[in-house]
Image (cartoon, rainbow, N blue to C red):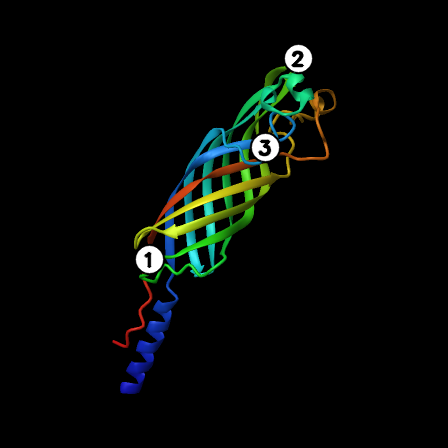
């Protein structure tokens, strides 16, 4: 009977030792666009980005991660370093709502079960989809197509995070999104009837956008227990 009790306690302890810590919090920062309109700086946040983020920490070295972010992408030719764009003078603003999911990898162990402060750089990648409005340019003016589309992409994120209390984690990150779309800046209309007459720019390069900001997450979930009683 004692052996069975010890075995059950051991199995229960092992199960608890694999219990995961969850994180839920907010993202706040800025966005910038890289495409056929406006400046081409890769890190130059100009428009507010806000949203929520959730992580399921599968181990001290990796986490599953989901985020929902809202921002406005802006392109202004007059802010470009290219003389041709400055002379053209196009401008646009496009609201986007992005859902992203993937895996986050830490450079070092980030053990939220430990009583000691933890800090580490990290990488995140996965898939993203951003809902955006469709438009095109005519005589330098933005003409709405009164439709929306989804731009699928790959997030490439580099960040640094640290535990600032027993249940709070603060992080700073820069994340570029390579999309499989060239419609975010109006250089390629969504309507096939307009593509040939209204398209411009480099058709071999798709659109990019970048989010730069901070996350503050609250951790919850059962801590592991190795107690034999």
Residue 77: % across, % down: 61, 21
Q: Residues within 10 Å of mark 1 (few under 14, many from 20)?
A: few
Lateral position of residue 134 relative to residue 1, left or right:
right
Q: Determine if residue 1 is in view.
A: no
Which residue is labeled 1 in the image? 221
65 w.r.t. 146: above or below: below
Q: Which mark is residue 108?
A: none
Mark closer to the chain start, 2 or 3: 3
- Which quarter of the image is occupied by the N terminus? bottom left
Q: How many marks?
A: 3
Sequence-first tag of 1 and 3: 3
- The image quadrant of residue 142 is top right
Q: How far apart are the two marked residues, 1 and 3, measured between alpha carbons?
A: 41 Å
- The secondary structure type at the circle numbered 3 is loop
Secondary structure of the residue carrying numbered label 2: loop
Q: Which secondary structure lies at badge 1?
A: loop
Write the residue at 65% across / 32% down: 182
Where in the figure is residue 5, as x and y percent of width and height? 28, 81
Mark found first going from the N terminus, 2 or 1: 2
Whether residue 25 is situated above or below residue 185 in the rendered picture: below
> Residue 90 is drawn in which quadrant?
top right
Residue drawn 57% across and 40% down?
177
Q: How far, Cα to Cα, is label 2 from label 1?
A: 57 Å
Q: For the C terminus, which image quadrant?
A: bottom left
| Inter-mark Cα distance, 2 to 3 | 26 Å
**Residue at numbered disc 2:** 139
State the mark number for residue 41: 3
Can you give x and y, in whole percent of width and height, for residue 117 in the image? 34, 57
Mark 3 nearby-residue class (10 Å; few <14, some 14–19, many ≥20): some
């Amino acid at each position: 009977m004692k052996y069975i009790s010890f075995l059950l306690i051991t199995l229960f302890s092992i199960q608890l030792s694999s219990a995961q810590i969850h994180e839920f919090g907010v993202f706040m920062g800025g966005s910038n666009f890289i495409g056929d309109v406006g400046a081409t700086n890769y890190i130059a946040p100009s428009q507010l980005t806000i949203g929520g983020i959730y992580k399921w920490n599968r181990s001290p070295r990796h986490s599953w991660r989901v985020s929902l972010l809202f921002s406005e992408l802006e392109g202004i030719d007059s802010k470009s370093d290219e003389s041709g764009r400055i002379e053209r003078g196009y401008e646009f603003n496009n609201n986007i709502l992005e859902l992203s999911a993937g895996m986050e990898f830490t450079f070092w162990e980030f053990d939220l079960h430990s009583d000691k402060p933890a800090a580490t750089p990290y990488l995140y990648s996965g898939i993203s989809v951003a809902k955006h409005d469709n438009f095109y340019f005519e005589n330098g003016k933005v003409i709405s197509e009164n439709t929306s589309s989804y731009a699928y992409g790959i997030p490439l994120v580099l960040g640094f995070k640290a535990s600032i209390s027993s249940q709070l984690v603060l992080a700073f990150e820069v994340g570029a999104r390579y999309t499989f779309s060239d419609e975010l800046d109006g250089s390629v209309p969504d309507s096939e009837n307009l593509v040939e007459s209204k398209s411009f720019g480099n058709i071999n390069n798709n659109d990019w956008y970048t989010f730069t900001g901070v996350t503050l997450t609250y951790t919850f979930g059962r801590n592991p227990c190795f107690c034999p009683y």
